[in-house]
Amino acid sequence: MNEDILRFQHQPVAWQILSKDLPAGRVSHALLITGAEGTGKKTLARMIAMGLVCQGERKPCGQCPACVQAASGSHPDITWIRPGEPIDPREEKGKKTIPVGDIREAARIVSVQAYEGENRAVIIDQADKMTLNAQNALLKVLEEPPHGVHFLLLTEAPGAILPTIHSRCRIVPIRPWPDHLIAERLIKTGLAEDKALLTAQRAGGSFGKAMQLAANEDMWQFRDKVRQHFFGLQRRSEILTASGEYKSDSTAASEALDHLEDMLRQLMLCRQERHDSSVAESFPEDWQKIAQMESYAGFVRLQDDIANARLYLASNVTPQAVMERLMFHFLEEKDQWLKS
Ligand SMILES: [Zn+2]
C-alpha cells in the first residue's frame, strides 16, 4: 500500500473505508468528507475513487491500468466537479459556485453504463459552493442513486450543505493531523529537522498549510535574524543595534517572541536528547554548550522573561524597549551559565 493511503491510519473513519469497505466492495454511495484546508480531503477522495475503479486484487492496487488512469486524473468513470470549471458546457466558466447544470450533467453521465468496471465516482470538491438549486438536484440523485455510483462530497464548511444531504451521506471527518506526522513528511521533502518541527507546530494539523509555511522564505530569514539577535549576542554594546530593528514594530516583536519561545523549547528538547544534534547546531556555540548543561533554571527564567515581554508589549511599552530588556536577560543568563 502506498504512503498516501497508510497515512490515513490516523483517521479512523477514512481508514475503515480504505482498509475494510473498499476491499469488501461496501463503500456507501454518498460520502461527505469534511476537514480544514490542506488536511487531505482530495487525496482521500482520489484514493477511494481509485479503489472503486481498481481492477486489481488489493484495492486500490495503484498499479493496474485503471489505477494508473485514475491517478493521472483521466479515468472516464471518475468525474470531478469544482467551482469555476463547469462540466456542463453551457455553464459559464470561472464562477465561484457550482451550478445546477453541473449536477444535472453528472447525473446524466452516471445514468449510462460505466465505461470500464461497474463502479463510478463523482467527486464534488468544495461541495459547499453548490447553489441551492444544485444541492436540491443532488438530493434527488442521492434519493435514488444509480447502481454502482458513488458521490464523494468534499467540504471545509459542512454547515453550508443542506441537512437533508448530510443525512444521506456517510460523514467522513478528517481531523487535524498529529504534528509528528507532518514533521516526518516535511523532513522527507528535505527540510531540516528544526524547521520541520516548527512548521508542524504552526500548521494546525494541516499538511497543506505546513507545505506553504515551509516554503515561506521570509519567515525563515526572520527567524534566523531573531536567532542572531538573541542567541548571537556577545556583549552589551550590541544590544542597542539589535533592539533597534524592532523600533516600533510590535507585530515583528511579537512574531520574534513566538520564535524565541520555540527556539528555547528546541534547546530544551536537545538536552533531553529528543532531537538529534543537527537542531542544536543551528545555534551559536555558547548555546550548544548550554544545551548540554545540567541546570534547568535558566531556561525557566528565560521563558518567564518572554511571557513578561508579551505583557509589556500588550501594555504599550515600545517594542524596542521590550526587546532591549529581553536581550539583556538573554545575555546575562548566558554569561551566568557559562561561568557556572
Ligand atoms: Zn488497481
Image: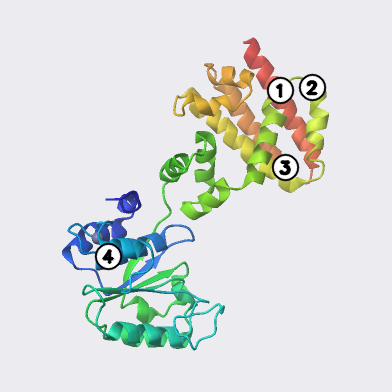
Q: Residue at x 45, y 24 (%)?
A: 273
- Residue type at tag 3: Ala
Q: Which residue is mark 4?
A: 66
Q: Counting residues from the N terminus, which is met first, the one under dot 4 or under dot 2?
A: 4
- Please tell me in which quarter of the rendered image ligand 1 is found: bottom left
Q: Quick one: quadrant of the C terminus?
A: top right
Mark 1 and mark 4 in contact? Answer it, CB < 8 Å: no
Crowding at label 1, few (<14), some or many (≥20) Cα neighbours within 10 Å?
some
CA–CA distance in space, label 4 to label 3:
54 Å
Mark 4 and mark 3 in contact? Answer it, CB < 8 Å: no
Mark 3 and mark 1 in contact? Answer it, CB < 8 Å: no
Tell me the tag on residue 253: 3
- Residue type at tag 2: Arg
Number of the front mark, 1 or 4: 4
Number of the front mark, 4 or 2: 4
Farthest residue to the top: give it: 339
- Residue type at tag 1: Leu
Mark 4 CB within 8 Å of ligand 1? yes
